[in-house]
Amino acid sequence: MTLLFLLAGCGLSSFDSELSRIDSITAGPDSDSDSDSDTGVQSGPNSARPPQAGELLIQELMINPSAVSDAQGEYVELRNLSTDWLNLGGVVLADEDVDRSELQPAYTDSLLVSPSGLLVVCAAPSGNGGVNCQATINPKSTGGGFVLANSEDEVLVISATGQTLDTVRYAGPSVPTGAALGLRPSIQDTGANDLLGNWCAQVSRLSSGDAGTPGANNDSC
Ligand SMILES: [Ca+2]
Ligand SMILES: [Ca+2]
Ligand SMILES: [Ca+2]
């Protein structure tokens, strides 16, 4: 009996030391806005912060929809590459010409993006061919708005403080009609999305009949 207790005692003590070893791995200095030590659990939307360069990825562009007009059906999908919640309030979509339009929330808190989460910016919140949008821009082509030209264009994502967060340029032959252009899913880098060879036409169907994956992982290339 004494031997059994001794063995049980050894087991518990070893279990305790294993627990404290795990604690020492998962707990760290508190770097988010809550008061506990960080345990590897992601911070919440209340701690959302502005994005820095490299943290927002342009990964899908509906440049030339067929089923609805361009002013209704264009959209841009962005991914949060950071491990924090990001607040896209004040973020602007622009080009290198006259386009410049600040993201407007589609509903309360819709500009807060979870870690690895997606945000879809639409030209129109409805009548867009079946796209659920978290943000809208003004689809005006003559300045003070943002459109995706079908021939060639640039997409700049600019922070509220004027920092360029990501840029993509595209031109003619790579632009599909009636399908969004999507970044290869394995590419999670704001430098690598500059290469048009890393993009391809999406094939998943929207309710309109056009193809795209707004708010979902991109189709493979
Ligand atoms: Ca267009
Ligand atoms: Ca880029
Ligand atoms: Ca997508």
Image (cartoon, rainbow, N blue to C red):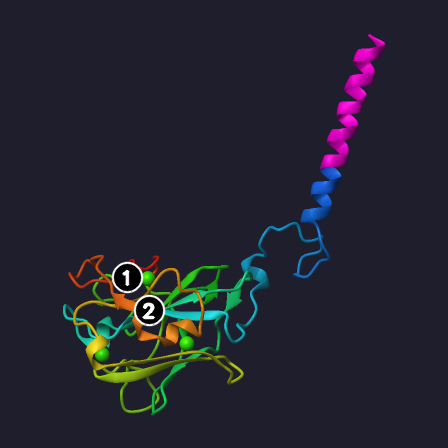
For label 1, the residue is 221
Of all residues, the one furthest to the top in this rendering is 1
Q: Main secondary structure of the magenta part?
A: helix
Question: Does the Cβ of the disc 1 residue fall within 8 Å of ligand 3?
Answer: no
Is 105 situated above or below 96?
above
Q: Position of residue 2 (x, y in %)?
A: 85, 10
Q: Where does residue 177 sit, x and y in percent of width and height? A: 16, 72
Disc 2 element: helix
Residue at left offset 71%, top offset 54%? 28
Q: Which mark is residue 198?
A: 2
Tell me the CA gap for discs 2 and 1. 8 Å
State the residue at coordinates (49%, 79%). Answer: 159
| Numbered mark located on residue 33 in the image | none
Q: Nearer the viewer, residue 134 or 158?
A: 158
Magenta segment: 1-18
In the displayed structure, does residue 40 sit left or right of residue 8? left
